[in-house]
Image: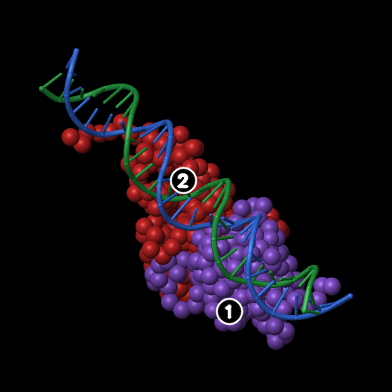
Chain colours: A red, B purple, C green, D blue
Amino acid sequence: MTRAPASRPARQRLLDAAGELFYESGIAATGVDAVLARAQVSPATLYAHFAGKDGLVAAYLEHRFRHWRQSWDEVLAERTDPVDRLLSVFDAVVRYREAEGNRRGCAFLAAATELPPDHPGQQWLAADSRLLAERLSELAEEAGVVDPTEVADGLLAFYDGALARMARQAVAPGLDTGNPVERARQVAAEWLTGRMLQASPTG
Amino acid sequence: MTRAPASRPARQRLLDAAGELFYESGIAATGVDAVLARAQVSPATLYAHFAGKDGLVAAYLEHRFRHWRQSWDEVLAERTDPVDRLLSVFDAVVRYREAEGNRRGCAFLAAATELPPDHPGQQWLAADSRLLAERLSELAEEAGVVDPTEVADGLLAFYDGALARMARQAVAPGLDTGNPVERARQVAAEWLTGRMLQASPTG
DNA sequence: CGCCTAGCATAACGATCGTTATGCTGAAAC
DNA sequence: GTTTCAGCATAACGATCGTTATGCTAGGCG
């Protein structure tokens, strides 16, 4: 019956094409025709595998979320120092952006401004936000800081800031030099050590 | 000849409608028809005043940029303490968002992900980036920090982070409570004082 | 008054959007 | 060898996009 279909190539080509075009040119600005042309696939095939463009967008975001979480997992597995583990989110971004060829900013941030509130892909944006908030809080707790929530909140601010600046950087090169993520990691490290020094002497 | 036209209302209504719809629903997702319907204006009138939709988008971004810069100017005029002046960018965002009814994140950040590189509105995104970078550097220099560029860079990271988190917040309420901008101001203040304490004893 | 020009609405344009109905092709089942 | 069915391409659909051609209406000037 439901034998393993030989349709892997078509579906995979579709996802690859969507991944590149949606990320590079934006979701709304990328027409279905462009995806079909790049994947060399017919319209009927797309609608046989996905629930229209919205379904393809959701699949694109899901793939991106899983890949991103996996990158973070890998980096986290290599770190033992509590502070390094807290800052691993920045290293994971660098690794993730090296794995995929990412020139623009955060895909989830971009999708958050493009997608309507009831879009099926919104669940993956929420999943990304939840992953960041929960994992950073856990790591802050492991690190033994006095107020894990506030520390996680601060790190999240640095993280979002770095990703947002990447989106800006694509427009105006300006005075920005180097990688915003790496600079954010450095500033975050300063802030973090300052916060921990404040707390530990009293313990 | 070019007598002052009585067309103020039509053009103004157009700008108002565009401002609300572009900001609320996104630029690409907002059709010209929706703007025309809200402004109660005919298509011909739009194309008589603006160079198509792109021209209207550019005018929308220009208005937003000027209003934002004015808000910052006003806040800056009230501050005398160098640190307060450095942190005024956060207060200006709060004031700006109170003046206009802003529920979503930064309009420039959203436009940066939506607009193609050759769009006529890009100049205002670049103007915003330039204003932030230059003014923060100047204020950092006035404050007498050892490395104005790095301080401006760090504050810009906090600023972009706060705005990006507003965009996220609209999607996933998550653990976020309160205003991201106000929290970013507080964390930025901590970081800034820590940095200034590091430097001043050596002077 | 009669003309003329500016400013606007009505209506329609071609292009492109996302989507689907129809028909071909090729391998497994008997 | 014939049947059958899944997978795919060709072609076209209605809807909506941004844009423009046409016509009406009000006010300045002869």
Q: A181 and B19: which one is in front? A: B19
Residue B85 position in % (x across, y down) = 69, 79
Q: Residues within 10 Å of mark 2 (few under 14, many from 20)?
A: some
In the rendered view, does B127 fall on the left or right side of A77? right
Residue B101 position in % (x across, y down) = 54, 79
In the rendered view, does A118 fall on the left or right side of B152? left
Q: Is residue A75 visible?
A: yes
Q: Are marks 2 and 1 in contact (CB under 8 Å)?
A: no
Residue B119 position in % (x across, y down) = 66, 55
Going 72% across and 78% down the picture, which residue do you hit? B6
In the rendered view, does B21 fall on the left or right side of A69? right
- The residue singled out by tag 1 in the image is B100
Q: Nearer the viewer, mark 2 or mark 1?
A: 2
Image quadrant containing the C terminus of chain A:
bottom left
Going 18% across and 34% down the picture, which residue do you hit? A1
Residue type at numbered disc 1 = Glu
- The residue singled out by tag 2 in the image is A32
**Cα–Cα span, label 2 and label 1:** 36 Å
